[in-house]
Image (cartoon, helix red, strand yellow):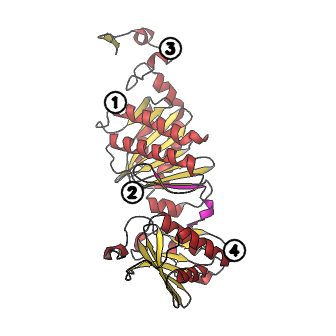
Amino acid sequence: MSLPADQGQLDDDGFRVSLEGATLPDFVQMECLAMSNRVFRITSGHRIGYLFFNKGQMIHALSGDHVGEPAALEILKWRDGSVEPCNVGWPDAPTIRSTWQNLLLLSAQARDESGRHKLVSFPTNRSAAPRSDMTKLAKREDPSMNANAPPSSSSSLSLAQFQAFVRLDTAGNVVSAKGESEELAPVAAYTARLAELIGNMLGMEGFNSLECSFPKERVFLHRERSGNLVALKVPADAEVAALRERFGL
Amino acid sequence: MLTQILAAMRDVDGVHGSFVVTRGGVLAGKDLPPMFDDAVLTEVGRRVVRLHEGLSAGGQEFDHCVMRFADHKLYLRSVANGFLCVLSTNGVNTPALKMALTLTARRVDPLIAEAAAAPSPPVAPPHASEAPKSSGAVSEAGRRVSYRGHRV
């Protein structure tokens, strides 16, 4: 199988996130659910590997000693390091036949499940870092791993604090979801539509985002450039400064 | 009176103006340039109410809501009798605006129901016949004017 050369190009849409304490399986899951067509360089200490995603599957992997599924399983064992998109040559044919779910199950058997803490940092200043999707994975207990994080990383929001997350496409189909998303999805879709109508009537085009504060929680909506709608629900006491900055609120 | 109170919102740089709608979606007052006519604001008010109902479907009522558009923001502050809506640029001083919103909301809240029930609101509310009649100007409030069978 030959893959188009431009599949390695970076997509300008979406978040640039910094993840602290997340795991590579989490990352793989996100990329596959997002139907990503990209290559990522995984660096962990002196080890470097590459994961290739195409149409929601991991189709190829490279590590120091392995290619294909063994390489993917080896990389998925790594506990800390960084992830960044890159442009490297795509294989002529997939070297991984297993589904990503199966790969994660296999890797999970070898992983120590303890100490899984998740932190998401949304950089507060896009211009503070080069314009690229940069994802850093680091152990929360190891502050030295955060030395290269953007200054804004102090404003962070725990993934565990997301009560609900959902991404809807332009037709209202759920692209990805987490938590109590069944209630959030219709509310988000309806609210965004009303916000657009209100904006149009007042001569304010280009609905971008919305924040709504309730006594116990906050709801954020954001219209991505792709037209997809992202909705988040977080507790009222969650630190959301970076999220507001990111959404222009 | 409402207009005078709302005018204070424009002390904050970047605020274009504001308007107030009742919980029923009736325009109760405004301080906006003339290009925002009452008919438009009335329809916006109804949608603000629907937006509030949609977001509050989970059982909680929102305190405030901000919508960001390409060049502008719309702030909604929920008060007991309605919603205070403020139009601003995206670069508005947010802390200053929030402070002004809080102070203005306190002052306009008691006047919202009163303004909506007044005999000559900016736009006739859809359920004007259900609104309590003003104690003053009984003859004016009680007079029905119709055109081609429709009350105007």
Q: Secondary structure at mark 3?
A: loop
Q: Read off the chain for label 1.
A: B
User: Is B44 within the magenta?
Assistant: no
Q: Secondary structure at mark 1?
A: helix
Instruction: Specify the amino acid type for callout 3.
Output: Ser
Q: CA distance from mark 2 to mark 1?
A: 28 Å
Mark 2 vs mark 3: tell me if same chain: yes
Between A190 and A42, the one lying in front of the other is A42
Q: Report which residue position mark 3 lands on.
A: B135
What distance separates the C-alpha of mark 1 from that of mark 4? 59 Å
Q: Secondary structure at mark 4?
A: loop
What range of the chain is rendered magenta? A153-173
Q: Chain of mark 4?
A: A
| On screen, residue A61 above or below B82 | below
Q: Secondary structure at mark 2?
A: loop
Residue at 53% from the left image edge and 62% from the top image edge:
A241
Tell me the number on the disc at residue A115: 4
Asked if disc 2 and disc 3 are in contact, CB closer than 8 Å, the reply is no
Instruction: Name the N-terminal-most of marks 3 and 1.
Output: 1
The residue pinned by badge 1 equals B39
Q: Nearer the viewer, mark 1 or mark 4?
A: 4
